[in-house]
Amino acid sequence: PPLASVTGIRLAVIQSTKDHYVAAAESRKLLGPDTATRRLYSVEARNHMFGGARDELLHDLDDALAWIESKAPSETATP
């Protein structure tokens, strides 16, 4: 996947399932499978603006930010 080349940082993408700019399946292809450094959050929403899914969007945003700011055990280990 194209975004697999992004390394050294955590990357979270929040995607509407009915986004008319980038289809949810295309986002998954670009990001690849979820890994220790990449996550895709799919929000069941009516459109690109997350219509009808504000609460789910905010929940996933909070989760994504907490995950990005946290350190995985392998990232905190000292040599």
Image: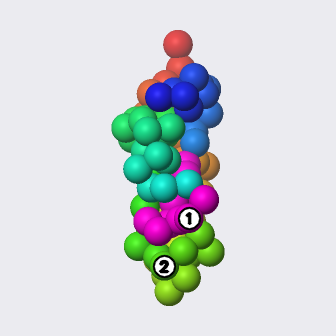
What is the image's colouring?
rainbow
Q: Is residue 62 above or below residue 64?
A: below
Indicate the amino acid at tag 1.
His
Identify the element where label 2 is drawn: loop
Task: Report if residue 15 lies within the magenta region.
Answer: yes
| Rendering quarter of residue 11 | top right
| Nearest to viewer (mark 1 / mark 2) | 1
Task: Report if residue 23 lies within the magenta region.
Answer: no
- Seen from the viewer's position, the closer of residues 29 and 57 is 29
Please, which residue is most extreme toward the top here?
A: 79
28 relative position to 64: left or right = left
Do labels 1 and 2 touch, CB within 8 Å? Answer: no
Q: Residues within 10 Å of mark 1 (few under 14, many from 20)?
A: few
Q: Position of residue 46 (x, y in %)?
A: 48, 79
Residue 20's disc is: 1
Please, which residue is most extreme toward the bottom here?
A: 52
Q: Position of residue 34 (x, y in %)?
A: 39, 41
Residue 55's disc is: none
- Seen from the viewer's position, the closer of residues 68 and 45 is 45
Let me know if residue 48 appears in the view.
yes
Residue at horizontal 57 percent and vertical 23 percent from the top: 5
Indicate the amino acid at tag 2.
Arg
Distance from Cα at disc 1 to Cα at disc 2: 10 Å
- List the residue tagged with mark 2: 46
Q: Position of residue 8 (x, y in %)?
A: 61, 26
Q: Is residue 15 above or below residue 2?
A: below
50 relative position to 73: left or right = right
Which residues are drawn in magenta? 12-21
Residue at horizontal 47 percent and vertical 76 percent from the top: 45
- Seen from the viewer's position, the closer of residues 53 and 47 is 47
Q: Position of residue 68 (x, y in %)?
A: 58, 48
Identify the element where label 1 is drawn: loop
